[in-house]
Amino acid sequence: VTLGDTDTTSIVNADQDSRLKVYHIFSRKHGDLERDYNDFEIEPTFFSQGPGNHRDVAQNRRNDVIFSPRIGSFNARMFLSFIQADGYEPLEIEAIVFRIPDKDVCDRLAEEAVGYGDGHRAQREALSVLLNSGPFRPGQLFLLMEQQNIELILQPHNFINRVASAADFAPSAIYKSGYWADHWTYYMDFIDTFLSVYPDS
């Protein structure tokens, strides 16, 4: 999905507008779900994303930009950014994390989300702390808000779009064993599909 400032009427992608964020909601290990060794996991949160092996996630995302042009070169950039100088690559890809280091921005988002009145002060302050406490994923944020009884006056999708628009993001992966020659095939597929949609880029 594309989060952030998604209501813009101009035809822009995540490369052109930093307020747009790409977030893959679903991921899985390869193979048949009934086989225990495939370790299928879905977190019990909103915007759930289980872990996925590098190869499987790359295979599944190769054509994303064709179906959703607004993601731009996100997949190509993310996967290529994981390659270390010696060619070592991660085994598992995890969901990206968001971060809002500016406390003033967190305060503003909290005010917009729960209200300005004195009766909302405790919830407003609690939400600002959550937003400013380091890396988070959308599902984790909603779960923590639920646990702290923070009630929104915005629709949840409008709230998370405002949060994503203001946030920085970072890809996340787990390095275990990682030298696979076939990954270059997927990298070229990412580049080729991107150029088929954006030939002048």
Image: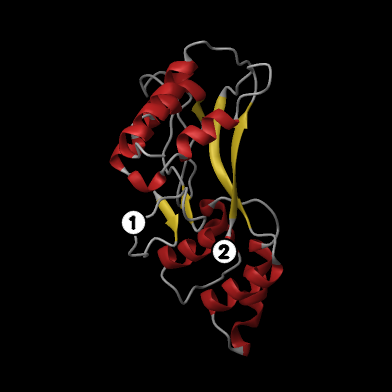
> Can you identify the residue that label 1 sits on?
11
Residue 130's place in the image compared with 177, above or below, is: below
Place of residue 92 in the rendered image (x, y in percent of width and height, measured from the top left):
55, 26
Mark 1 / mark 2, whichever is N-terminal: 1
Residue found at x 66% / y 23%? 84
Q: Nearer the viewer, residue 84 or 24?
A: 84
Tell how many labels.
Answer: 2
> Can you identify the residue that label 2 sits on?
145
Indicate the colouring scheme: secondary structure
In this picture, residue 183 sits left or right of residue 134? left
Residue 154's place in the image compared with 173, above or below, is: below
Q: Nearer the viewer, residue 21 or 17?
A: 17
Outermost residue to the bottom: 118
The image quadrant of residue 190 is top left
Place of residue 11 in the rendered image (x, y in percent of width and height, measured from the top left):
33, 56
Instruction: State how far apart marks 1 and 2 are (Cα).
Output: 33 Å
Outermost residue to the front: 200
Residue found at x 37% / y 22%? 34
Residue 179's place in the image compared with 146, above or below, is: above
Place of residue 13 in the rendered image (x, y in percent of width and height, measured from the top left):
41, 50
The local crowd at label 2, few if under 14, some if 14 to 19, many if 20 or more residues have their Cα within 10 Å, is some
Residue found at x 34% / y 44%? 69
- Which amino acid, mark 1? Ile
Place of residue 100 in the rendered image (x, y in percent of width and height, measured from the top left):
64, 59
- Which amino acid, mark 2? Met
Where disc 2 sits, the SS reads: helix
Give the label on residue 177, or none: none
Q: Quadrant of the C terminus?
A: top left
Residue found at x 60% / y 37%? 172
